[in-house]
Amino acid sequence: MKITQHLLERKFLYLAVLWSVIILYLCLVSIKGTPSLVSIPNKDKIVHFIFYFVLFYFWKKALNVYEFKRQLKLVLILVVYGIIIEVFQWMFTKDRHADIYDVIANALGAVTALVFLRFVNK
């Protein structure tokens, strides 16, 4: 049983790291000239929300974080990660910019995941 749990945690660690890198890449890559497939207002905020909802889930499972205080710390770490990415957009890209509403969407995604998973796991 412990071996299975360890392998599962390891799988989630790989997923968490991979998802973190994917988010970083997608937030820093140039999107200039990329056609929009869907015309939903503020769709990027929905994407940010989903990114961080999933990111919280992967890191929660990878780190085996079930205590509420530790989950709040994880949310804080993920929000800081999102802020760092926004700063990188501002500093290192020409056609991307930092947006406080992206940070808010990131935070809401992580917090919603925390609340949702607490209810689902009861």
Image (spheres, grey):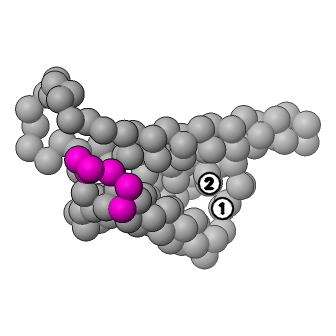
According to the picture, the residue beneath numbered tag 2 turns out to be 60
Bin the neighbour count of mark 1 within 10 Å (Cα to Cα): few under 14, some 14-19, many 20 and up: some
Number of numbered labels in the structure image: 2
Task: Give the residue at x 14% y 47%.
Answer: 42
According to the picture, the residue beneath numbered tag 1 turns out to be 66
The C terminus - image quarter? bottom right
Marks 2 and 1, how far apart at CA: 7 Å
Corner quadrant of residue 11: top right
In the picture provided, is 10 more to the left or to the right than 107? right
* Of the image marks 2 and 1, the number of the one nearer the N terminus: 2
Q: Is residue 75 visible?
A: no
Task: Give the residue at x 62% y 54%.
Answer: 60
The span shown in magenta is 91-96
Q: Nearer the viewer, mark 2 or mark 1?
A: 2
Q: Nearer the viewer, residue 15 or 23?
A: 23
Counting from the top left corner in percent of width and height, residue 71 is at 58, 66
Q: Is residue 93 visible?
A: yes
Q: Nearer the viewer, residue 86 or 54?
A: 86
Please, what is the three-letter code of the amino acid marked with disc 1?
Tyr
CB under 8 Å between callouts 2 and 1? yes
Please, what is the three-letter code of the amino acid marked with disc 2?
Lys
Counting from the top left corner in percent of width and height, residue 12 is at 67, 40
Q: Nearer the viewer, residue 104 or 32?
A: 32
Bin the neighbour count of mark 2 within 10 Å (Cα to Cα): few under 14, some 14-19, many 20 and up: many
**SS of the residue at dot 1?**
loop
In the picture provided, is 36 more to the left or to the right than 7? left
